[in-house]
Amino acid sequence: MSTHFQEDEILGKAYDARLMRRLLRYLRPYRRAVTASIVLLLLAAAADLAGPYFVKVAIDHYIQVRDMGGVAVVSALYLGTVIVGAAVRYWQNYITQIVGQQVMYELRMEVFTHLQRLAVAFFAGNPVGRLMTRITNDVDTLYEMVTSGVVTVFGDVFLLVGVVAAMVWLDWRLALVAFSVVPALVALTSWFQARSRESYRAIRIRIARINAYLNENLMGMSIVQLFNRERANAARFDDLNRDHLTAHLEAVWSFALFYPAVGFLGAVATALLIWYGGGQVVQHAVTLGVLIAFIQYTERFFRPIQDLAEKYNILQAAMASSERIFRVLDEPVTVEDPTDPAPLPRVRGQIEFRNVWFAYPATEPAGPEEAGPPGEARSAPGRGEPPVPAGTDGWVLRGVSFAIRPGESVAFVGHTGAGKTSIINLITRFYDPQRGQVLVDGVDIRRYAQRDLRRHIGLVLQDVFLFSGTVASNIRLGNREISDDEIRRAAQFVNAHRFIEELPDRYATSVVERGATLSSGQRQLIAFARAISHNPEILLVLDEATSSVDTETELLIQEALQNVLRGRTSIIIAHRLSTIQNVDRILVLHKGRIVEEGTHRELLARGGIYTKLYQLQYRDQELRQTADMSGDRATDARSE
């Protein structure tokens, strides 16, 4: 099995100024709150800097002269700065968290809204799990950067600069002694950043491999179990998981070494201060208060360095997440509404294709879930054909032209890959053709707003998607104009009312994800009820919708199909020719072209492709019936 994974699952640069500028634009509406947060952070850092100085004043000016009144005053001032610092940090943290939550809310909405505007082709090449990660995990990573990185780094830098200034101001010689470990600290920090960068990259690569392998295995679990691949796949997953563990342990080793090493350098600086500063105190060159203040400032000097190193890791994750999020936001909307859409309050149902040439966008070579729109074969241009557009997989429809009258029922048939599903995709405007026009009521559908066009189209597929909610909500699909009585009438019209009434809560029965608690036939009947309740003038049906149900349910669905087709412009994508013998017209597609047209009887009389398809399909049915009869006789013989 493949362990393909996308490069966008790993990361780009450790710091990208372009991405950072784009991220900071989301903070512009909250510039006042961000400014207030930074000011509060600076005040908190200033309060932190005042502490050692108060200790120095208390020792040098009051303790040594036994002035307890002065000691009490300085102690009160010290306690006051601690209280003020705590209060300031509370408000700073509160404001930052509020801003962070608001920014992430808006970013999530922007990503979700943009995803809803993208064409179906985008989702054919991007697994659902990856897109969910963009809206959830990646946005959460940016939240951590906003709250713990962008703002608080100002406090760390200010504290670091303030400590250096205070130490130099108190005594430059003691400052030089304390800073003697800085070269080693710089080298250690540089090593840690490089090591952390490589460790983070290794972890991302390995987790991407695990995600790809998991996705492939879970999607193909029936095949895994059928061919007894559980042990082999578990062994392969163990290898990937152990590789991921090793990468994490290497990162843990870097972290485990860095922080104690920084602490050790801080201890060395403190020891040097005690050794050199103690001598200066003995010689009365430096006061005891200055030495103790220096020791406390040294501890404050190393603390923000450790914090900044941790924020470097947050920054790495944020850059990777922002790059992935902006890649989604930068995805162009290929199927757009016109600036001045034509009105479409009602349609007669006339459909026309005029010399339509269509090719699907090329999909990236990825896992099976990214294989592009299913059901159509791609091929290179033939002699006299226009060149294949760049970034596509070859022509699927070649100069297709036909017209369907209002209220007419038309079926499309052909071998797999002939272009049948593409007809549906173009009418619903999931895709736009590269050449030619698709017209509804004589108007190019690109002149209509997509919402207006699709409001008049009903689509019934084999793989019915039911949302979490109730049976009624799945029929209504958020359209509050559809009353409960209309839902019941629609269900009765398509023979769904009887089984719905037998459910525990009838129309209020909860539907789990994708309708897993309902049979495939019940889901199909709900799909027909959904289509009829919205009262579309144009109905598009894939007859695969009845291919995986029992005989009794199939009869119900066929009856429902006849009911919903009556009086509507109907297009049936036919795979089983027995379902379309009574339609008004049949169009035969072959390699993206319409090669035959007529009624069922007319096409059989011609002896062309339709006749061959019909004979082939009925021969397969006879073979299956013969096999079933043989099996029944063998069973009877054993029972005797």
Image: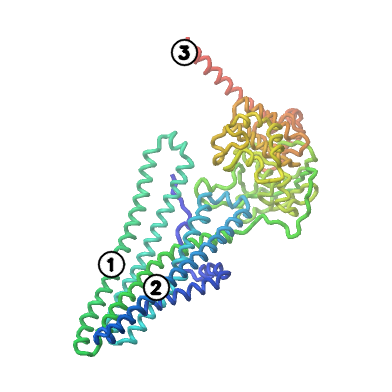
For the residues bearing labels 1 and 3, Cβ distance under 8 angstroms: no
Left or right of residue 133, residue 441 in this image: right
Q: Nearer the viewer, residue 389 or 288?
A: 288
Crowding at dot 3, Cα within 10 Å, few <14 / some 14-19 / many 20+, comes out as few
Q: Is residue 189 above or below residue 474?
A: below
Q: Which residue ends up furthest to the top in the rendered image? A: 640
Rendering coords of residue 535 (x, y %): 74, 40
State which quadrant residue 558 falls in. top right
Q: Residue at x 33, y 54 (%)?
A: 246
Which of label 2 and label 3 is nearer to you? 2
* Residue type at tag 3: Arg
Q: Nearer the viewer, residue 533 or 253?
A: 533
Q: Nearer the viewer, residue 398 or 341?
A: 341
**Tag 3 secondary structure:** helix
Which of label 1 and label 3 is nearer to you? 1
* Residue type at tag 2: Ile
Q: Which residue is mark 2?
A: 83
Q: Which residue is mark 3?
A: 638
Which of label 2 and label 1 is nearer to you? 2
